[in-house]
Image (cartoon, rainbow, N blue to C red):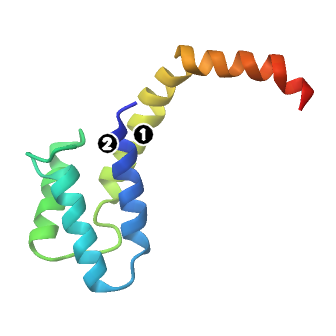
Amino acid sequence: MSSENLDFWKAVEQYQTMSQVKHREIRARNIMETFIWEDSPLQININAKHRHEIEAFFKENKLNNDLFDKAQKEVYDLMRKDSYARFKDSDTFKSFIQSFQTYGRHL
C-alpha cells in the first residue's frame, strides 16, 4: 500500500476536526506542502482538476472544512480498490488468516 495515501487521509481527518483558525491554517499548509503541491515529498496521485481547485482555494485562504474532501474521497477509493485488494492477496495477509484459523480456535 502507498503509505502517503493513508497518511493524507489521516491528515485530512485531523484537519476537519480543527476549530481554531490558526491551527487549521497550519495543518492546511502542512497538507499542501506534504501531499498536494506538484513537488511535494509524498505527493498523492489525484485528479489534476481537484489538485488545482484545492490550490486555488488555499491561495485564496478559503480553508473550509471540505477543502480536501474531493481529494480524500479519491484517495479513499484508490485505497479501497487497489491497495486493499493487493493487501488481501499478499503473503502477509494469507499468513495471518492461516495462523488465525490454526490458533484462533484456541482463543
Image height of 45 relative to 70, above or below: above
Q: Percent from the top left, x then y, of residue 97?
A: 70, 20
Q: Quadrant of the C terminus?
A: top right
Q: Percent from the top left, x then y, of residue 64?
A: 29, 75
Residue highlighted by disc 1: 77
Q: Nearer the viewer, residue 38 or 64?
A: 38
**Mark with earlier residue (1, 2):** 2
Which quadrant of the figure has residue 103?
A: top right
Q: Quadrant of the N terminus?
A: top left
Seen in the picture, residue 60 relative to 1 is either above or below; the reply is below
Label 2 Cα neighbours within 10 Å, binned few <14 / some 14-19 / many ≥20 = some
Of marks 1 and 2, the one in the foreground: 2
CB under 8 Å between callouts 1 and 2?
Answer: no
So how many labels did they put on this image?
2
**Which residue is at the front of the view, 92 or 20?**
92
The picture places residue 41, in percent across and down from the top left corner, at 16, 44
Residue appearing at x 19%, y 67% in the figure: 29
Q: Which residue is mark 2?
A: 4
In this view of the protein, which residue sits in the foreground, 33 or 65?
33
Where is residue 20 drawn, in percent x and y? 34, 86
Residue type, numbered disc 2: Glu
